Image (spheres, rainbow, N blue to C red):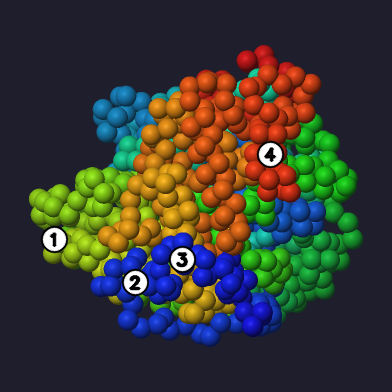
């Protein structure tokens, strides 16, 4: 046996398990199972054309070679991206630790208190620095966060403004170029008109509902924005500010000046540049807008014993749950990166951050001073880290490049230099030497930094921040290491047990896929570095695009979108541009089956489309008659159908080709939601079912870890007619020749995370990918057969097969007083994370084991489910039962009192396997309603919490 084959490591079941599994499923071979599962007419007739699989060892050498083709310059480009220093203790204990990176979004709060606390720290850090009341637990990048701010301000216009259809949004010309591009993308479809200009000459007309400023501006100039905000607020214009997080250590907080929203990136808080991402964006606002905030908010509540517990707050407010009433489609965010940035705040504390901000500012000041001595003119009257020099920029560029230095050149006479945390005095002298050489002068050698003086009292910060204990307690490495471990131990991740979340594809995130992320030759490339410095990235990204294009059966791919929902939006915007290019700008109807994920209608609305919901049949399939009727009824204006395949019900609908052809006949394009691609790879594909565009969730099918709720990568793959419209970037050329404006801030989105999917595909090859899909289907059908007679599987294909996931019905247990939530919580006592609860059907669970789980693990899970089934029967109407009290904590089980009508052993060790690897939930069942009524979203001291209570 070739034990060096990666497929052997990635796929769970062993060859020796096969006979028993196949027998249980009732087939002779895997081929027979696949034949009975996937409709014949959509099966690929040729194997995918991919390079032969590399072993892990070969891949390590290969990726190292590609890394060496990246040239790491000292980049002072700025524009929202600054080299940062990742504290090693955070890199090793979080970024490189599966306990953190394999966790899922903390929907099951009782087994997620660790990352919930880390995120609460992050939110607190953001509210402190911005001076706002509330912050969310991250967005995708600064530019999309700015677009979300615009959408929020549009949604909360006053009644008069809505009546008068006030729709203008002012954008300062000091905004970052990528943010402007994103605002353009997002504004038009929702009916917002952008006006770009100088905020100092803005005429404060009542035609505007909102405005956005950059703080400091893209030139580095710090504008005194208080005056603008006052005048704007006086006539009902609400102001958002995109602020540099590190500068806020020294600058007056925007919240103190009455702004309504503050956004930005936290990249420079210890996150590698990674050629553009992933990084966490922050979004902070006033409490008054708590129901309009995009993304997730962590809040404080209490558990069944009244103890403090954390959870995701106001979930019903989450935009994508509101479907076509939503103003945002954000689902996956950047949780792992937010955890890291928050931990950077914990590591440095207020004194450390102050030191870093001072060092950066003093370095910039010292540079300006030295350049002045050389006779150069610096144009920013007030700045934090960025200075602008008037000189021949081409000449400087040439010498800088020779010295492996990148500056930013806004025009032929201007050089902009952004100083960052990693800039040393040696680096400073290298910068000065470039200018001296250009001027043909002897350079000035700087020996120490001078005290910065460019931030005067009017704009300087005078309020404290990060005063809470957590930011002032863990400043030795031993202490921080243990704090991180303490939090990690509260969370159930893939390194403990299977997480069978349907539609989420929690598969192995192999160590060999993750290793390259730690390499500075991948980490330290600025997204706007010239292409010839990023050759390794360019080769890798292009290869990944080709692989995904081949896998989906399409003609082109854009890696730009940072999540599945962003992919949906990008795909719909591409469809929109396609229709417009043909003079069909009236086409704005989007058909969406009732079973679709909430992000689908939310994305459609954001893309300016009108959602028409089509019905489902009793058996869960799309009602084709209804679909045809609606497609024909709207044939003049039909833009698209959004369809998930296999369906969100876990079924390969055999009529899919008929469905796509009905849409085409009526002038629409077919958008396939690719969240379920794990059931297709190498066996069928969106091209084969007749779709025109799909997004892929690389953080589902293609092994990027979920990170507790992000990062994600949501590329779109498109048929040839849509290739010209793939999205662009305003700084670095990318996308098609009729490209739409930007979907994400960075040209290739979260390029660093793309390494993981590239590793996954390259090490599996065609054979390994196909086997993975086959085993994903086998594992699901094995579970289905094992649960037969205990739970009812709601939907199956024509021959009784599940796809890669299945829905089990928990509604009948209501008779016994048991809700689906009780099963989810009881599973924790058995050491498992619940499957997806109540999606796509309320009162059900959707189970997706993935190919990575072994037969032993599947059996443990099934044993647990069957044992729970018996508990449900026994629970009959005694409200003090083991299900209702679940999960059981260590504190309960070791308490001197025990008032339950069952044993402690039954509570905590219900099956024998549990004792061997017990996982203890750290809080009892959390009270969701209480947390929403008493919203606290920062780590305020416990006394404050008690007072509120
Ligand atoms: C996960 C998922 C999405 C959204 O993906 P994100 O990356 O979370 O934005 C969309 N549709 C379906 C069916 C999904 O399962």
- What residue sits right under mark 1 in the picture? 666
Q: Nearer the viewer, mark 4 or mark 3?
A: 3
Q: Which residue sits at x=73%, y=29%?
A: 893
- What residue sits right under mark 2 in the picture? 35
Among the two numbered marks 2 and 4 on one chain, the one whose residue lies closer to the N terminus? 2
- Residue 186 located left or right of residue 345: left
Q: Nearer the viewer, mark 4 or mark 1?
A: 4
**Which numbered dot is residue 203?**
none
- Residue 665 located left or right of residue 411: left
- What residue sits right under mark 4 in the picture? 909
- What residue sits right under mark 3 in the picture? 23
Query: Regarding mark 3 in the picture, which secondary structure is present there?
Result: helix
Q: Measured from the top left, where is residue 772 in percent x and y? A: 50, 70
Q: Nearer the viewer, mark 3 or mark 2?
A: 3
Q: CA distance from mark 3 to mark 1?
A: 46 Å
Vertical arrangement, residue 9 with respect to residue 802, above or below = below
Callout 3 touching callout 1 (CB < 8 Å): no
Q: Which residue sits at x=67%, y=25%?
A: 308
Callout 2 touching callout 4 (CB < 8 Å): no
Q: Which residue sits at x=71%, y=56%?
A: 97
Q: Which residue sits at x=43%, y=84%?
A: 49
Q: Quadrant of residue 915?
A: top right
Q: CA distance from mark 2 to mark 4?
A: 41 Å
The quadrant the N terminus occupies is bottom right
Kindly tell me whether residue 863 is visible in this rendering. yes
Query: Regarding mark 4 in the picture, which secondary structure is present there?
Result: loop
Q: CA distance from mark 4 to mark 1?
A: 59 Å
Kindly tell me whether residue 361 is visible in this rendering. no
Callout 3 touching callout 2 (CB < 8 Å): no
């Amino acid at each position: 046996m070739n034990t060096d084959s990666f497929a052997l490591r990635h796929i769970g079941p062993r060859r020796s398990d096969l006979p028993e599994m196949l027998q249980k499923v009732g087939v002779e071979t895997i081929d027979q199972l696949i034949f009975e599962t996937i409709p014949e007419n959509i099966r690929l007739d040729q194997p995918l054309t991919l390079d032969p699989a590399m072993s892990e060892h070969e891949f390590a050498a290969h990726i190292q070679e590609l890394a060496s083709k990246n040239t790491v310059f000292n980049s002072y480009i700025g524009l929202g991206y600054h080299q940062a220093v990742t504290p090693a203790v955070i890199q090793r204990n979080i970024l490189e630790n599966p306990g953190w990176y394999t966790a899922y979004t903390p929907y099951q709060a009782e087994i997620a208190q660790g990352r919930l606390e880390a995120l609460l720290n992050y939110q607190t850090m953001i509210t402190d620095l911005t001076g706002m009341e509330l912050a969310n637990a991250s967005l995708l990048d600064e530019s999309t966060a700015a677009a979300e701010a615009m959408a929020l301000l549009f949604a909360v216009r006053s009644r008069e403004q809505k009546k008068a259809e006030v729709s203008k949004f002012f954008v300062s010309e000091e905004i970052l170029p990528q943010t402007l591009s994103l605002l353009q993308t997002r504004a038009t479809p929702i009916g917002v008109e952008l006006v770009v200009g100088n905020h100092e000459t803005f005429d404060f007309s009542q035609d505007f509902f909102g405005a956005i400023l950059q703080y400091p501006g893209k030139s580095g100039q710090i504008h005194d924005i208080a005056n603008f905000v006052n005048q704007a607020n006086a006539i009902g214009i609400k102001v958002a500010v995109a602020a540099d997080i590190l500068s806020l250590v020294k600058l007056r907080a925007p919240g103190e000046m009455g702004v309504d929203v503050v956004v930005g990136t936290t990249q420079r808080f210890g996150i590698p540049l990674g050629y553009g991402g992933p990084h966490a964006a922050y979004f902070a606002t006033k409490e008054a807008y708590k129901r309009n905030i995009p993304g997730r908010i962590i809040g404080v509540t209490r558990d069944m014993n009244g103890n403090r517990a954390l959870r995701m707050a106001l979930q019903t407010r989450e935009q994508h749950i509101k479907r076509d009433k939503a103003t945002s489609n954000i689902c996956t965010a950047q949780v792992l990166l937010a955890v890291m940035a928050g931990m950077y705040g914990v590591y440095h504390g207020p004194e450390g951050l102050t030191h870093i901000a001072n060092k950066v500012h003093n370095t910039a000041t010292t540079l300006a001073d030295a350049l002045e001595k050389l006779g150069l003119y610096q144009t920013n009257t007030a700045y934090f880290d960025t200075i602008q020099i008037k000189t021949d920029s081409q000449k400087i560029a040439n010498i800088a490049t020779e010295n492996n230095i990148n500056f930013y050149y806004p025009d032929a006479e201007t050089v902009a230099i952004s100083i960052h945390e990693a800039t040393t005095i040696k680096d400073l002298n290298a910068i000065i030497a470039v200018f001296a050489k250009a001027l043909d002068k002897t350079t000035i050698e700087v020996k120490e930094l001078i005290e910065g003086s460019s931030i005067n009292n009017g704009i300087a910060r005078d309020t404290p921040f990060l005063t809470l204990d957590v930011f002032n307690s863990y400043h030795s490495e031993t202490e921080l290491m243990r704090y991180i471990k303490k939090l990690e131990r509260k969370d159930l991740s893939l390194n403990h047990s299977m997480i069978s979340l349907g539609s989420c594809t929690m598969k192995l995130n192999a160590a060999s896929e993750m290793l390259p992320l730690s390499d500075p030759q991948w980490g330290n490339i600025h997204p706007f570095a010239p292409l010839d410095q990023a050759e390794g990235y360019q080769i890798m990204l292009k290869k990944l695009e080709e692989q995904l294009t081949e896998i989906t059966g399409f003609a082109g791919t854009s890696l730009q979108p940072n999540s599945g929902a962003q992919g949906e939006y990008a795909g719909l915007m591409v469809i929109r541009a396609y229709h417009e290019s043909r003079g069909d700008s009236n086409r704005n109807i989007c058909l969406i089956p009732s079973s679709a994920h909430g992000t689908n209608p939310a994305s459609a609305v954001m893309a300016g489309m009108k959602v028409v919901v089509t019905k489902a049949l009793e058996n869960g399939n799309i009602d084709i008659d209804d679909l045809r009727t609606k497609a024909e009824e709207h044939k003049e204006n039909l833009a698209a159908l959004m369809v998930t395949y296999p369906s969100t019900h876990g079924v390969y609908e055999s009529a899919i080709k008929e469905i796509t052809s009905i849409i085409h006949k009526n002038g629409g394009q077919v958008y396939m939601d690719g969240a379920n691609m794990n059931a297709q790879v190498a066996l069928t594909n969106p091209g084969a079912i007749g779709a025109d565009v799909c997004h892929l969730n690389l953080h589902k099918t293609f092994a990027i870890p979920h990170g507790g709720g992000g990062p994600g990568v949501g590329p779109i793959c498109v048929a040839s007619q849509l290739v010209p419209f793939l999205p662009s970037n305003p700084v670095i050329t990318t996308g098609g020749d009729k490209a739409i404006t930007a979907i994400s801030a960075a040209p290739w989105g979260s390029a660093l995370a793309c390494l993981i999917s590239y590793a996954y595909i390259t090490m599996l090859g065609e054979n390994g990918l196909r086997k993975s899909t086959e085993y994903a289907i086998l594992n699901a059908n094995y579970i289905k057969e094992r649960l037969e007679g205990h739970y009812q599987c709601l939907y199956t294909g024509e021959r009784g097969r599940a796809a890669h996931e299945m829905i089990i019905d928990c509604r009948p247990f209501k008779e016994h007083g048991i809700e689906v939530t009780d099963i989810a919580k009881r599973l924790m006592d058995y050491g498992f994370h619940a499957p997806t609860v109540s999606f796509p059907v309320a009162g059900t669970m959707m189970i997706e084991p993935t190919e990575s789980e072994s037969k032993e693990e599947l059996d443990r899970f099934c044993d647990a489910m069957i044992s729970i089934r018996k508990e449900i029967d026994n629970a009959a109407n005694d409200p003090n039962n083991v299900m209702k009290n679940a999960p059981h904590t260590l504190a309960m089980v070791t308490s001197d009192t025990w008032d339950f009508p069952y044993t402690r052993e039954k509570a905590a060790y219900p099956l024998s396997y549990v004792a061997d690897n017990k996982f203890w939930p750290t809080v009892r069942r959390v009270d969701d309603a209480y947390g929403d009524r008493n919203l606290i979203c920062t780590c305020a001291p416990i006394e404050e919490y008690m007072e509120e209570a």
